[in-house]
Image: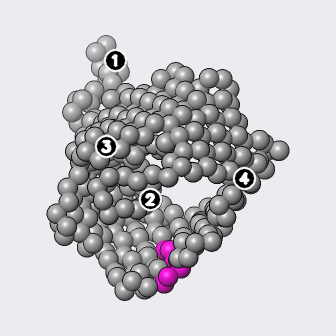
Amino acid sequence: MAGLVPPGPTTVPAGESKKAEEKTDFMNLPCPIPFEELHREALMSLKPEAFEGLRFDFTKGLNQKFSLSHSVYMGPTEIPSQSAETIKIPTAHYEFGANFIDPNLMLIGRVLTDGRLNARVKWDLTDNLTVKANAQLSNEPHMSHGIVNFDYKGKDYRSQFQMGNAALFGASYIQSVTRHLSLGGEVFWAGQHRKSGIGYAARYETDKMVATGQVASTGVVALSYVQKVSEKVSLASDFMYNYITRDVTSSVGYDYILRQCRLRGKIDSNGCAAAYLEERLNMGLNFILSAEIDHRKKDYKFGFGLTVG
């Protein structure tokens, strides 16, 4: 009878099963994020959209693809100064915008009362090739500019070529090496200023953390680290060093998503602290509070705004 009993299921040790799961399939690596967005998680916490004064934004959808926007801003504007103190002048402007958003095409235009015109285009030519263009026209001399990017998304890599006015050319490439690690590089040439540069970057990402390092021939060394404490809480830090000018800056920040609001803030080694709060009052209605305090420069910025639509 013992010979008729079927053999029991074979058990695999937990250690061997874990090793099999961690084994990298180099023929099926994930596609990395664009080179220009290497530090995007850290920038969300460490670079909040701080502003000073009053801001009001209203967006009205005319149909599923087309919408109009109106924005009013009232507050001081900083002007360049050789002194240590910050010089501000009171300003106010109105901005009118038109948006067309389609699954394969996005057109965004803005015109301001001071004469500036901004335009953005994103066009998915194929599933892998995207064209992006940004332009700004201004009455002030040497303030108008434009740039065009060609982005190609491969199975496990991304490449980009860009060209702009003033004989600006650049290219970047980033490749997934493992499931968590990606390496990349970039080159650029600014013909008007007769300057060129090359840079290298590495990014390591898991479900709980993101670490990024970047170095360029211009002297910039940038390191960032983001720890995802939970689905709603993230902590971030960065380190910026220029080995040519010997300038060093570091900062720590947080990103906290609550049920009705999102709170972001940071403090850096120069003593500058900032916080940005977005509170959802109702569907399509958000209240914004912004604050930035720099004790060293004696510069204090406080702003509040309302977003409708």
Q: Judge left or right: residue 118 versus residue 160.
A: right
The segment highlighted magenta reads: 161-167
- The first of marks 2 and 1 along the sequence is 1
Residue 229, image x, y percentages: 33, 29
Name the residue: 36% across, 71% down: 186
Name the residue: 44% across, 76% down: 170
Kindly check if marks 3 and 2 are in contact, taking CB atoms under 8 A apart as contact: no
Q: Residues within 10 Å of mark 1 (few under 14, many from 20)?
A: few
Q: In 3D space, how far apart are the residues under numbered discs 4 and 2 (Cα atoms)?
A: 24 Å
Kindly identify which residue carries mark 2. Answer: 79
- The first of marks 3 and 1 along the sequence is 1
On the question of residue 275 being in view, the answer is yes
Q: Nearer the viewer, residue 81 or 179?
A: 81
Q: Nearer the viewer, residue 48 or 154?
A: 48
Residue 68, image x, y percentages: 76, 48
Q: In 3D space, how far apart are the residues under numbered discs 4 and 1 (Cα atoms)?
A: 80 Å
Identify which amino acid the numbered label 3 is placed on. Lys
Kindly identify which residue carries mark 3. Answer: 298
- The first of marks 3 and 2 along the sequence is 2
- The first of marks 4 and 2 along the sequence is 2
Q: Judge left or right: residue 248 versus residue 71.
A: left
Kindly identify which residue carries mark 4. Answer: 96
